[in-house]
Image (cartoon, rainbow, N blue to C red):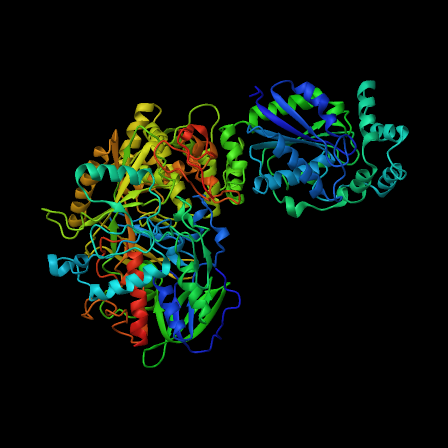
Amino acid sequence: MNLHDMRTYAHDDVVDFVVIGTGAGGAPLLARLAERGLRVVALEAGPNFDPDEFTNDEVEAPRINWMSERLSGGDSPTAFGLNNSGWGVGGGTLHWGAFTPRPDPRDMNLFTESGLGADWPVDHDELIRYIIDVERTIGVSGATPYPWDPEREYLEPPVDRNASADIMAAGCARLGIRATDAPAAILSRERDQPHHGRRRASQNLGTIHQGERYGTKATTANTYLPVAVAAGAEIRPDSMVHGIERDILGRVSAVVYRHDGREFRQRCANLVLAGGGIETPRLLLNTGLANSSGQVGSNFLAHGAVQVWGRFDEQMRSYRGYPSGLISEDFVRPDSVDFAGGYLLQSLGAMPLTYATGLVRGGGLWGSELMDELDAWRFTAGIGMNGECLPTENNRLVLADEIDEWGVPRAIVTVTTGPNEQAINEHATAVMTRILDAAGALETRVLARTAHTLGTCRMSADPAQGVVDADGRSHDIPNLWICDNSTFPSALSANPCLTQMALSLRTADRMLG
Amino acid sequence: MTRHDCTVFFLHGLGFGGASAAPLAAALGDRFRVIGIDLPGHGEAPDAADGSVNALADAALAVIEAEADGGPWLLAAHSMGGKAAALVAARTLSGHANVFGLTGAVLLAPSPPTPEPMGDEKRALMLSWAEDGALSEIDAREYVAQNVATPLAVNLEQDAVALVRRMSPLAWQRWISEGSREDVSAAVGVIDLPVIVLAGEDDDDLGASVQPGLLSAVYPRARFVSFAATGHLLAYERAPEVAAEIVHFWESTASAAPAVAPEWSRMIASSRTAVEARALLAQRAIADDANYSPTTLSPEQLATLRTLADRLVPQSGDRRIDLAARIDADLATGRGDGWRPAELPDDATAYRRGLDTVASVWPGGRAQQDDLIRTILAGEFDAGKLDGAEFDGGRFDGGRSDGDGPWSGDVLRRWFDDVRTDLARTWLAHPASLARVGYDGFATSGPGAKPAGYVNLGAGTRDSWEPAELGSDQLIKESNL
């Protein structure tokens, strides 16, 4: 994005806020604080990309992903790299799938409802007001009326369905399952985005996870960050924070970061951590801060994200078009089940190397069977789930002995899928298989995986149960805030990014009092 | 569709024009479609706007774009043409030309990307020949005679002299005073391409003895061949022998990689595909070096990885991708996939130790190999049952991640998951593999893609720019952009 002529601040200026990270957590808040006249500096570990630097080549596209190595343990090791964390101005929104379901009130009261997991100390109606604000700002397309929420209105009509979406729609219709065009942060009409410029209408690109050049997909780099810069925020790319300094009262007084091989120190009156579910707890564990509860790094949550692919007679080539064009919320609370929570369904498009990785890792294929499945790929259409995940004692992030390129210990993330997640996965797998069968699939294949990194600095009303309060403020250090998906008390069946942007605006309002 | 295996684009030396490819074309026969390119000021081609080597490369690329048939092609280039060919190859492999399919280069006494070694006296003499316009019969004869070891046959000499006399004196002067002295090595960089460099032993400035010093760093894969009793005009002096070298080069080296079908090649070459995507596909399409020396793995470990690759990601036919070599090269960059199982050491160390483990128990029979692979995949491999002497890497130590013994159980399985993933992704990233599985998403988001993506998304449909095999043309909706 354009950072020319932005306002800059001196290192020994005590700026009002330093924000670490420019993704869905850091950017909306940065814009709102700057618009209110506060002096704000964002530090982004990755570079500032020109959209032309995005490539649809899957081998090279990870330049927009966090590729510094993370270690995965447990019985269900979670894959990082191409998944989960962004790299560059725009953070994870550079590679996100732009799938924007709203959070369900039942998911936010999971503990009250089931006695499992945790409740959100945030009012659903209040959060939805912020979500509507975000949807208007970034441009979300979707179906109106929306079958599961008659009052909801999407300002943009849906984008085109691809073959997977058509298949899922046909299968759901035959089974009496409600499904409709998914809410997506993809423009169906071009627009002028304030302080950014022209954003094109959908080009039916299937390569949005690799970065998208035309602004059809909302990122923070084409929405909130240009507003922030226009209002006087400074964004410093290539700046990796690894230290936090405090005054004699224990309040944050400065951050220490590495830029261009040199150490810098930026003084600040307040600090916001918005580096995501891995980097935020890693920084806190490394500095030993804000952890009187012992909850930093605990409660790691990852959505169950099993995929089922069906093979059909015709060429589907579901790599074309917006990948997740159809949604069903019929299973947020399925009937007669014995698990807590539920899941969303979405149609799937996949890129070839991503699909091959799924066949190898998730499907266990090798040899001629693998090659046959790759040859059959063009005939496949898929459905995926996003399922609730409960916190458990052993699913957590700790620091390794091994040091990364900035001198910070690497993260070890241990994940073992629990019985509730397994029950959700099995239910969803059966439903997805039935939908594909109903649509005429010749055969189906299940690919196991998980997605997202949540919960490692969760918010809680009780300071003993979490790291920050409902506003995002540290229970321990009053001028330290966290605004990213590490604060999620439960996973929700909705994908996290839209909720995160809304929480960011809400936290900004709480900061402004 | 013609029946040739390959197109040879011939870039001539100073004075000769595209017609000087004729003796070589005759010697190569029908398997090769030879296109002699008239560089600026030669043959039918007008003078360029300036005397730069870039102008020569622009002209050559314009012909290559126009004459491309979607099949594979070689650059063959003599002397001055060799300097232009270096830029042509660099621009092709960096995606900055709307061409695809370059598989190798055959350089005949090429002028290097650096200033050409040429004495001042010779330079002055040659400039004097064109002072008053086109070269005289005598000067042209002198030029040809100076550049051969033994006189050419009369008809060949007459052809050569006629070509030289026909060329533009401006182009002659420009090459001698500008192009030959220009340093284009920064723009050329390092060209990782199968290359043979042929040169005569009786060539004063660009002979066999100087070529390795001039070109080894530019073309790390170059093989140098010297011709005894041969001067500078190899395509005239040794047409049958040069042709034999090209045939051998094509069969043994340049054609070793899987072929990309013409319809797909043309799509990659088109402006629907972005520059960087085209560059990546062009580089991956190049045949692997049969003499590849591993940098991260030992030769034995590379051999084990090749054996595993054959079973885990089997390739049919003679034309293969050396997946193991590509993974070794990738390991050397230190660029991983962003994570690793917590039990495993860094990728390079894990590969060495995992491959040593597999090598120590790899059975001869195919069925036994299948059993071993299934055992590893199930996490049930037990190195404790190994005779310690069988394992080169170290003593069995229960598979501790910081030890050096063979791995067992889940640790070996997790490394094996990484290997299988790397092999599959490396295979699929090749343009021939992408075409085989029906993926053309690389041809979106290029400067000429309007709209940037797709119009037809439904089952069985395709857009008009997509290969016919991908869907019915009865149903095509056109964009209204």
How many numbered marks does the figure carry?
A: 0
Look at the picture and state if A214 lies above or below B146: below
For residue A472, what is the image quadrant?
bottom left
User: In the drawing, does residue A79 fall left or right of residue A200?
Assistant: left
Q: Quadrant of residue A392?
A: bottom left
With respect to residue A470, does B227 lie above or below? above
* B102 left or right of A453 in image: right
| Residue in the foreground of this view, choosing between B241 and B25 | B25
Instruction: Left or right? Give the position of B381 relative to B174.
Output: left
Q: Find residue B369 and report its horizontal and vertical position in percent.
A: 32, 27
Q: Reply above or below: B18 against A495.
A: above
Front-lying residue, A360 or A272:
A272
Residue A360 or residue A47, whichever sits in front: A47
Of A513 and B179, the residue lying toward us: A513
For the C terminus of chain A, which image quadrant? Answer: bottom left
Against A238, is A217 above or below? above
**Residue that extends furthest to the front in the rendered view of this protein:** B480
Residue A299 picture location, percent across and down: 22, 59
Q: Position of residue A11 (x, y in %)?
A: 47, 74
Is residue B20 something that shows in the picture?
yes
Q: Is residue A417 visible?
A: no
Residue A79 picture location, percent across and down: 32, 48
